[in-house]
Every structure is written in C-alpha cells, then in structure tokens.
Image (tube, rainbow, N blue to C red):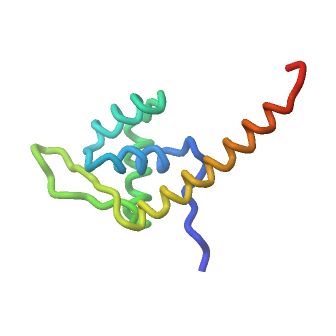
Amino acid sequence: MRKKELGRFSDASFLILSSLANGPKHGYAMMEDIRAFSGTQLEPGTLYGAITRLEKQGWIEALPTEERRRPYRITGEGVAALREQVATLEQVASVGKNRLATMEGF
C-alpha cells in the first residue's frame, strides 16, 4: 500500500491541519488563523480544494453547519499525519541550522 503524503511544508494541507489542531474551524476562520501563524494568505479555491483532499484522506471531517458555515475538525489520522510531518520538518530545520552554523564568511 502506498503511503499517503502531505506534501511540502508550505502546502495548504499542512497549514490546514496545523490550524485545526487548535480546534474546529470553518473556512474563513482557518484562513485567518493560517495568515496569523504563518503569514500565508490562502485563497478560497486553494483552501477548499485542500479541504476536499483532506476529507477524502480521512484526515479531517466536516461538522454540522453552524449559521451557514461548515466547521471542520482534525481526525485521529490527521493528528498522526501532522505529527509525522512536524517531526520531519523539525529534523530538516535542525540539519539546516547545524549546517548554517558551520558556514564561514556568509
């Protein structure tokens, strides 16, 4: 079986999972949260395309509509995928920091 991949660290899926790790949110609230913690402004088409993919993978799920807004929450599988991606990014950042520390004259 082929392992599901989240994509590069700046991928909308990673940002959405990170946002939902703080609790359920509807689309606009996710866009605002993502902009606040990452400086990335997701366009609605990008956001909702990624939400659709994440739902199909079972990493997030829709909750009942509240006042014409559809909130989403991260699932257990989504938490596991996010943990794995965060660990990978921490390793990459550590290697990058260590390599930068050995550079002289730059």
Q: Quadrant of the C terminus?
A: top right
On the image, which quarter does residue 2 sit in? Answer: bottom right
- How many numbered circles are shown? 0
Q: Residue furthest left?
A: 67
Q: Residue furthest top?
A: 105
On the image, which quarter does residue 93 sit in? Answer: top right
Q: Is residue 87 left or right of residue 44?
A: right
Q: Nearer the viewer, residue 12 or 21?
A: 21
Q: Nearer the viewer, residue 94 or 67?
A: 94
Across and down, in percent, residue 82 comes to 48, 56
Across and down, in percent, residue 104 comes to 89, 24
Q: Residue furthest bottom?
A: 1
Q: Nearer the viewer, residue 99 or 55?
A: 99
Residue at image location 59% in from the left, 53% down from the top: 7
Across and down, in percent, residue 67 comes to 10, 43
Q: Quadrant of the N terminus?
A: bottom right
Q: Nearer the viewer, residue 46 or 103?
A: 103
Residue at image location 34% in from the left, 49% down from the top: 20
Q: Is residue 87 left or right of residue 76?
A: right
**Residue 7, above or below 35:** below
Residue at image location 33% in from the left, 31% down from the top: 32
On the image, which quarter does residue 98 sit in? Answer: top right
Q: Is residue 14 left or right of residue 7?
A: left
Across and down, in percent, residue 23 comes to 28, 49
Residue at image location 29% in from the left, 55% down from the top: 73
